[in-house]
Amino acid sequence: MLSGLPRTADPNLLVGFDASDDAAVYRVNDSTALVQTVDFFPPVVDDPYDFGRIAAANALSDVYAMGGEPRLAMNLLAIPSCLGPEVAGAILAGGADKAAEAGAVIAGGHSIEDAEPKYGLCVTGFVHPACILTNAGARPGDLLVLTKPLGAGILTTAAKAGLLEPPALRAVTEQMAALNRAARDAMVPLEPHACTDITGFGLLGHLKELAQGSGLPAELWADRIPVLPQALDLAREGIIPAGAYRNRAFVGEAAQVCGAVPLALTDVLFDPQTSGGLLIAIPEDRGEALLRRLSDQGVCAAAIGRMLPPGGPLIRVN
Ligand code: CO
Ligand code: CO
Ligand code: CO
C-alpha cells in the first residue's frame, strides 16, 4: 500500500518497504538490531479495556513475528470527546497491562479527538541481526505451523450483529488478547526459516506474502486447519466480514482451492484476523519439537501445510 513512497538507501536498514514484512529492522551493531512497528485500529469489541488489550497484543505481535522482543512502546489514541476520560483510561489500562505482560514499557504517546475511537502502539523491540525472521526464508519441505485458530473476524462480525453468546465472545476476546510471546519463545531456539503473523489479510493473504517472499509455492491441508468454534456455522449463514472479500480479491489466482474443500472453510481461510497467531515455516525434522514446545507453553498450534519445490500455483489448498 505504501510502495509508492520514496526510499532511503541506508545499509543498516535490514528490512524495509521492499519486503511486505511485519516490521522494519535496523542494524545498530553486530549483536543488536532494532525492530520497529506501528499498528492501530477502531474497536473490535465493545469493552474498552478488552479493546486496549487486543490492540496492544496486535501491535506487539509484529515484533514477535520478526523473532524479536518488544521493549519500548508509545500509545496512539483517537477518542471522541463524548466518551469521557473513563473510556480513554480503560483503553490505555488494557494496553498498559498487555505491554507489561510483554516486558515492554510504555513511555508516552499521543492522543487526538476523533469521531471514531482508534488505539494502538508504536513498538520498538530488539533482535540479534543473525536471528531476524522475515517472509523470505522458507525452503522446500518446510512445515507450516499456525499458532492460533482462525475465525476471529467472523466471530467479531457476529458479535457486532448481536449473534454471539457471551461465552463465545469471551473466548474469542481472550484469544485476540493473547500475546504471541510464548509462540515466539518456543520457535526462536529451533531456528525456523520464516515467520509472519496472521492479521488483516487472513491466512491466505499472509501465506501469499510468505510464499512470494520465499519464491516458493505452498500447500495447505484444509482438514488440519484449526478453526474457532461456531466460525464455520456462522460463515455458512453468510456472516462474513467485508475484509474477507477484499482478501479473496487480493489473493486472486495465486490460490487454487481443491473443489472438495467446503466453501465455509474457504471463507475462514480469507477471514481477516485481529491479533492472529504466528505462521512459522520450519524444517520438517524440527516440526515435532516445535509443536511439543508450543503445546508445553499452552499454545494451541497445528501443522497446516508445507512449502513445495518451485513450480505450479503459488498456493494449493487440498
Ligand atoms: Co504482521
Ligand atoms: Co501489523
Ligand atoms: Co517476519
Image: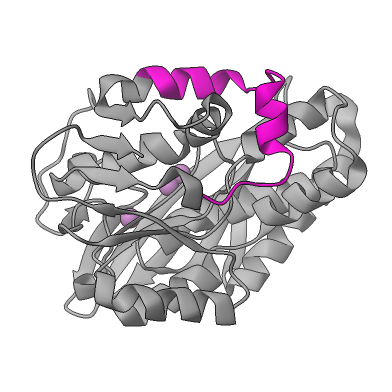
Give me the residue at 54% from left, 32% from top: 271
Let me know if residue 164 appears in the view: yes
Give me the residue at 37% from left, 48% from top: 22
What percent of the width, then of the height, locates residue 293? 48, 81
- Please provide the residue range marked out in magenta: 225-249
Between 193 and 129, the residue placed more toward the observer is 193
Let me know if residue 185 appears in the view: no
Q: Is residue 241 above or below residue 213?
A: above
Judge from the rendering whether residue 180 lies leftward or rightward of residue 234; answer left or right.
left
Residue 238 falls in image quadrant: top right
Please tell me how many numbered marks the rendered image carries: 0
Residue 8 within the segment the image draws in magenta: no
Residue 31 falls in image quadrant: bottom left
What percent of the width, then of the height, locates residue 75? 61, 49
Q: Residue furthest front?
A: 260
Name the image quarter holding the C terminus. Answer: top left
Residue 174 falls in image quadrant: bottom right
Give me the residue at 32% from left, 64% from top: 34
Between 52 and 317, the residue placed more toward the observer is 317
Q: Is residue 157 above or below residue 58?
A: above
Judge from the rendering whether residue 126 lies leftward or rightward of residue 254; answer left or right.
right
Between 41 and 237, the residue placed more toward the observer is 237
Residue 239 within the segment the image draws in magenta: yes
Name the image quarter holding the N terminus. Answer: top left
Q: Is residue 101 above or below residue 48?
A: below
- The coloring applied to the image is one colour
Give me the residue at 32% from left, 20% from top: 252
Between 315 and 211, the residue placed more toward the observer is 315
What percent of the width, then of the height, locates residue 140? 15, 57
